[in-house]
Amino acid sequence: SVAIMAGPVAGCVLGLLFLSYMGNEAFWVFLGFAMAQVAGAVFCVIRDPRWIGLGRPDLDLVRHAIAYGGPIIISSVMAWASQNAARIAVSYVFGFGAAGIYSLGMGLGYRASMVAAMLVTAAAFPIAVRLANAGDASGALRQLSANGALLIGVLASTMAGLAMVAPELLRLLMPGHIDGAVLPIMLWSLLAGVFICIRQHYFNQVFLLHGNTGPIARVAVIEALVAVVLAAGIVPLGGPLGGAIALALTSCISMVVTFFMAGKAGLIVPWRIMGRIAAATMAMVAALAAFPSSADVLHLAVRIGAGGLAFLAAAAVLFRGDLLAWRLRRQGGRGQ
């Protein structure tokens, strides 16, 4: 989790510092993110250097890696095509200026959802893998269900909250002549990001646990084709906003298809927990809506704090049984 968060968080901080003191050039932004990524890689090497060394390759291991990882590589390439088809179409039809607006809105929304998702899956998925490797297939699927509930809880709260305060954030962060164009693209990209994260970091993991990555690649290939068709049809009519809508539609279709495929492979969906998460999210949205919008930083902080407290309070009430059981387990552990 630390290594994965180093890129987006530390990279953003370093990029802003470089921009402030070294000059207003894109190079300094890229340098900040590159330094953060290298630092994350060094952190991983220091944590576990045992994999570094020379020796004869294990051909059986190589064949297994190709069979398992090959479809994942294909799906990653197709995911790039799916997520960039609309941007390329916007650039081709409307020029680089429109592509810049589209990229800004998509980056603010989609990247936010990816960072929120990685806060969960980077640490949670290895627990399910460990259970699967130990031969507890049913336990691994139950753990994956718990991971999915946590993922959806994080995505629902952060994405809904960000959507509610997005107009204020954009007014604070960018010139007024472009924030109106960026806002709807950002909102659609938030939705697309949620669909993508649920599929990649929840539904797809059923196939990863079973060691059957072929379905992931097949869905990714079909998704890329659908993305190209929708981008070609919607972008000329809807402009940059049409590109964001096309990506959201594409991501929704692929998520639904993967959901049914994963269901046949043993996916466990915690519907009751998801209902409680939805209720807590609605309480947060109501609290945010009770405060009038303002471009003042202090007012925005108070509004965000009120929404966060409302979500936590509602979640504490809705999950009071789980909280009580957790507290009793901790007390029992201390007593032993």
Image (cartoon, rainbow, N blue to C red):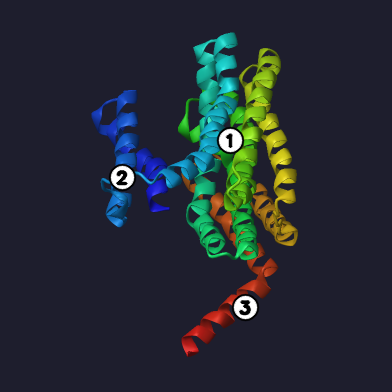
Can residue 187 be seen here? Answer: no
In the picture, the disc for residue 289 is: none
- Residue at mark 1: 167
Name the secondary structure under disc 1. helix
Using the image as rendered, state which of residue 86 and residue 100 is in the foreground: 86
Give the CA separation, mark 3 to mark 2: 51 Å
Label 2 with label 1: CB-CB less than 8 Å: no
Q: Is residue 228 above or below residue 52?
A: above
Mark 2 residue type: Arg
| Residue density around tag 2, few if under 14, some if 14–19, many if 20 or more, within 10 Å | few
Using the image as rendered, state which of residue 47 and residue 161 is in the foreground: 47
On the picture, is 246 further left or further right than 120?
right
On the picture, is 72 further left or further right than 52?
right
Give the CA separation, mark 2 to mark 1: 57 Å
- Residue at mark 2: 56
Where is residue 324? Give x, y as percent.
62, 78
Nearer the observer: mark 3 or 2; the answer is 2
Where is residue 179? Give x, y as percent.
55, 27
The disc, 3 or 2, on the residue closer to the chain's N-terminal end is 2
Nearer the observer: mark 2 or 1; the answer is 2
- Residue at mark 3: 325
Q: Looking at the image, which residue is at 60% across and 65% down?
A: 136
Using the image as rendered, state which of residue 66 and residue 141 is in the foreground: 66
Where is residue 329? Give x, y as percent.
56, 81
